[in-house]
Image (tube, rainbow, N blue to C red):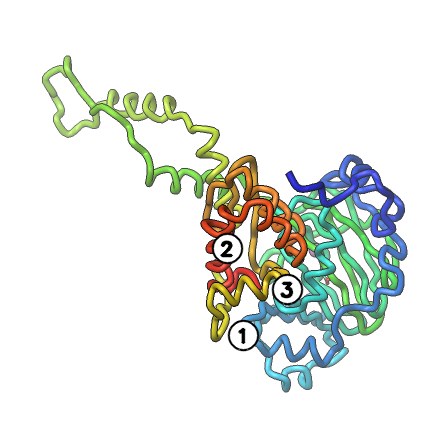
Amino acid sequence: MAAPLTNPSAPLALLGGLSAAEFMRDYWQRKPLLVRAAIPGFNGLLDTATLRRLATQDDVQTRLIVRDGRQWALEHGPFPAKRWKTLSPEAPWTVLLQELNFHLPAAEALLRQFHFVPHARVDDVMVSHACPGGGVGPHVDSYDVFLLQGPGRRRWRISGQEDLSLRPGLPLKILKTFKPEQDWVLEPGDMLYLPPRYAHEGTALDDCQTYSIGFRAPTPQEWVAEFLMDQAEHLQLPGQYSDAGQAAAEHPGALPAVMNTYLQQQLQALTFDPAAIEDFNGRFLTEPKPHVFFLPPDEPVKPAAFRTAALRLGLHLDARTRLLFSGDHAWCNGEGFPLADDERETVVALADQRHLSAAVLGAGEAASPTRWKKTLWPMLYQWYEDGWLH
Ligand code: SIN
Ligand code: CO
């Protein structure tokens, strides 16, 4: 197996001197952590002009939230350049750009600083840009989030309150009552980690940008429902319902209760092979969201030229690509494939690091030239043709 990507016990400035192991043990999913100067000198990844240009694109998920007293308005983008002229500081606004890591290599690089969290949990990097007073109101998220302050200052108030009921009739989820317990002003480079369902409200004090590095977790509702739909396609149950001994019907219109019992017994007898569960998880957790499209190269080079270029320049996964492995299997963008012993090291390194240097590719091929020719190069080439890697 390739060497581990992280040293879990090394102290990280990003986590205020905690090691990744300590952070994951004591804070992750458990309690908030404020880190001053998590990324010293961090001043955002894009200027306002670039942010506004991204917000005009229809492949960027954008929302605009405007507050007018106790009223809130929510609009979905894209937003033409002239939209900004109509905004006024009297009704403070926030614009939110989701999946910034798909559009900005620097945002993908920022996300990689959090690689002590399994890739299976990654959602995206979002940026919010607000005028003074702007914010999205007191709310909770279902995500783990690292809120990293870019340019400007933002005041964060948070609460471990249990009452998470929402104000009715609003286009966004705003808590009915918010009882802040802690209150900080974050300066550029400061960061606040919040576990899911922890109440919070961020208010811009200046013209400001905040970067949310978000980690998703499926709910059992969606997870199990998807699993059952997936398994239904492969289900092969033997036998047939039999009602030998059925009494002559007095009410032929009645639903025989034994038919319910029969189905209940069938359902209770269902078992799922652990390998099938893992394979489903691999496909499910690497499945790109429905709106995500890959961009194949305009004029793909031939396989031989691809190999030559890769051995010279290395390869990296497209920011949208999700790649996971376990044992002798790997899954990429919703598709599973077996891993032979002499392929594993390469695919593990690619999944962990999301790139393969020319040297690693060269060494991998030299160790097992036949395998590379037969399966690895064709697979990598196919991914290149599909826009999954570059
Ligand atoms: C924001 O950056 O304004 C919102 C982020 C959040 O509260 O999750
Ligand atoms: Co939030």
On the image, the x and y values in percent for residue 116 come to: 73, 45
Which numbered disc flags the more N-terminal residue, 3 or 1? 1
Asked if ligand 1 lies within 8 A of label 1, the reply is no
In this view, which residue lies farthest toward the top?
245
Depth check, front residue: 185 or 339? 339
Asked if ligand 1 lies within 8 A of label 2, the reply is no
Which numbered disc flags the more N-terminal residue, 2 or 3? 3
Residue under numbered circle 1? 58
Residue kind at label 2, given as amino acid type: Trp
User: Which image quarter is the N terminus in?
Assistant: top right
Residue under the image location 60 percent in, 56 percent down? 168
Depth check, front residue: 325 or 176? 325
Q: CA distance from mark 2 to mark 3?
A: 14 Å
CB under 8 Å between callouts 3 and 1? Answer: no
Residue under numbered circle 3? 312
Which quadrant holds residue 149? Answer: bottom right
Q: Is residue 371 above or below residue 73?
A: above
Ligand 2 image-quadrant field: bottom right
Which quadrant holds residue 197? Answer: top right
Residue under the image location 28 percent in, 28 percent down? 237
Horizontal side, residue 11 vs residue 268: left or right: right
Q: CA distance from mark 2 to mark 1?
A: 34 Å
Residue 23 numbered mark, or none:
none
Residue under the image location 13 percent in, 24 percent down? 251
On the image, the x and y values in percent for residue 11 come to: 87, 44
CB under 8 Å between callouts 2 and 1? Answer: no
Residue under numbered circle 2? 377
Q: Secondary structure at mark 3?
A: helix
Residue kind at label 1, given as amino acid type: Asp
Q: Residues within 10 Å of mark 2 (few under 14, many from 20)?
A: some
On the image, the x and y values in percent for residue 266 come to: 32, 24
